[in-house]
Amino acid sequence: MGERAINVVAAWQKLDCTDTEIARLCDIAMEKLSAPDKELVSRILQEVGFEERLVGYQVRERSGTIEKSLYSFEEVINFFNDQFPFLKFEELTTWLNVVIKDEELARKVDEAVEEGQSDYERTRLIRDLMEERLVQCKNAGVASTTKGVLS
């Protein structure tokens, strides 16, 4: 079982999920994304402009919602690590399709939205998928940089 799946199991055990629910969520978490091409790596590793940014909200007990502009793929992942993040999943899927142009990840995000039984589950599944894609892109970026140095 992969590290991501182990983290998913640990998180849902804390929530007192049944073994059946944990197995279902692990199946989603263990699905791998195909390797990204150079263009996708470039889009994921760079910031987007003001018009292309995502807007999410951090929910706070005393101050209410705080608007947060997200200008990069990595910022979205970090945003999902917040205690109470709020982002419209449809907007994220559109952003992934139109701005980032990662149709595979957008499709997986849609699947996670369908499979998750709460926004907490959905957010964690999406974050894990996005983290997987970011690691792929950073590894591909390092590999291409190393190739360029050796040539």
Image: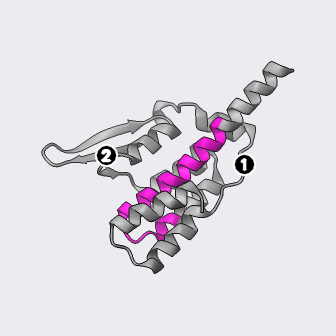
Residue 20 located within the stretch drawn in magenta: no
| Viewer-closest of 61 and 71 | 61
Q: Residue at x 47, y 80 (%)?
A: 20
Magenta segment, principal secondary structure? helix
Mark 2 falls on what kind of element? strand
Structural distance between the alpha carbons of marks 2 and 1: 31 Å
Q: Disc 2 marks which amino acid?
A: Tyr
The image quadrant of residue 106 is bottom right
Q: Residue at x 81, y 27 (%)?
A: 147
| Circle on res. 57 | 2
Residue 125 located within the stretch drawn in magenta: yes
Give the residues in magenta: 112-138
Question: Which quadrant of the figure contains the C terminus?
Answer: top right
Residue 34 lies, with reference to residue 48, above or below; the image says below
Residue 83 lies, with reference to residue 44, above or below; the image says below
| Viewer-closest of 17 and 131 | 17
